Amino acid sequence: MGKTFDLSLGIDADSLASCVSCGLCLPHCPTYRVSQEETASPRGRIALMRQVESTGVADDTFTDFMDECIQCRGCETACPSGVPFGSMMETTREALADQTKYQPKYRRLGYSILGMPRVLSIGSRLIAVFQRLRIIPSRLALPKIPLRQTKLKASGDDVWLFTGCIMDAWMRDTHAAVKRVVESTGAGVRLPGNDAGCCGALHVHAGLTLKAKKLGNKVMTAFPGTNPILVDSAGCGAQLKNYGHLLGTMKAEAFSARVFDVHEWLAENLEKLPKIKSNEAPVIVQDPCHLRHVQRSHEAVRLVMNRYIETIELDDDGLCCGAGGAYSSLHPETAAAVRSRKLESIDRSGGRKVVSANPGCMLHLQQAGVSAQHPLELIDSIITRAMNSE
């Protein structure tokens, strides 16, 4: 047992009692599959939560096991009892962040920068310079960050495109490709200002719920009106759809009802996409956890992809790839071990190219040498080539 300390989790008693320890979640928990430790499983973590809630005392071991959860929520999809594990984990991390030194100052500073678009932009340019000077360690597995970004321009006001923080600073080309695909349906795309920077997803994962709420309220002001808000990052989309729960207001509920993963919206407007024949080889679809297990809208990716290209299914039943937002940076060894199982599944599939609707998953797979890109980047290239050849 590590150092003990007082801790009050504040988790609803019914939620804690809802787990019957059946074990059906075990094959779907990436940390359990890697470690084979009971306390690294959902039911094991819930047992620890019950113990802490009943005694009011925790220790460093408790903190470690809570921190080592990837929060993929694959257990929720598998659970026949509907145990709200994701919510319980968020509440636990919030208690740790509020009552202990769980999140040190340097991490809090890093998370704060995500909500400062100008600072993030300047910092990203510095990283881009350091990359070209080969000062940045390769083990950080950062994408090649552009020195200059092409500004996205609005084309109408039929739908909004959420651009976010890191993705806009490092992967704006993906936004541009997504925007072109949406526009190919005839829809005009409206863009938010800097107020729509960070959605707060990483803050919630870290237990920094108060900061996430502040960011959420700021984001909502950047999207006036009632038009749909399209999101091309699964993690951000899950967070935006959860604002009703996070903020607890009718305004937030109404906002969340406007949010769609971009593939969801495209699937509803499938016939408006250009009709093009493609000779592309089949591609593997890797489902981001927050699209499959939280938003539960992963089938929309297949509907859109299959209009142009055949897709290959993996045989791992949607197991997490190990990226987990900031998880792969904080727990690189576990993240790599989890990813190795995904790589084995990719190898068995016989495909050569992977599409994944979340930037973190893409980067994590690319770090291991996988040819991975956003689904709509591939669709955009198919449409663009066809249009240019006419």
Image (cartoon, rainbow, N blue to C red):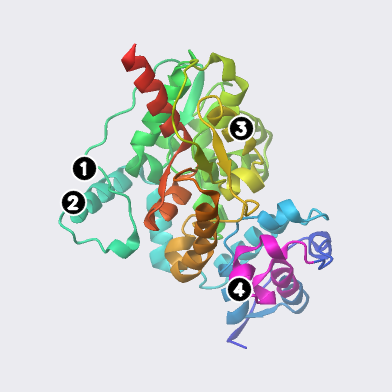
Residue annotated with mark 1: 147
Judging depth in this view, the residue of 168 and 280 nearest the camera is 280
Q: Which mark is residue 129?
A: 2
Judging depth in this view, the residue of 16 and 345 nearest the camera is 345
> Reading the chain from its start, which is encountered first: label 4 or label 3?
4
Residue 59 appears at what percent x and percent y? 62, 81
User: Residues under labels 4 and 1: Cα distance?
Assistant: 39 Å
Q: Check the image and report above or below for 229 versus 109.
A: above
Q: Check the image and report above or below for 30 versus 270.
A: below
> Closer to the camera: disc 4 or disc 3?
3
> Reading the chain from its start, which is encountered first: label 3 or label 2?
2
Answer few, some or many: residues within 10 Å of disc 1's Cα (few below 14, many 20 plus, some between 14 and 19).
few
Residues marked 4 and 3 touching at CB (< 8 Å): no
Residue annotated with mark 3: 300
Residue 102 appears at what percent x and percent y? 52, 71
Badge 4 amino acid = Phe
Judge from the rendering whether residue 302 lies leftward or rightward of residue 384; answer left or right. Answer: right
Judge from the rendering whether residue 130 lies leftward or rightward of residue 71; answer left or right. Answer: left
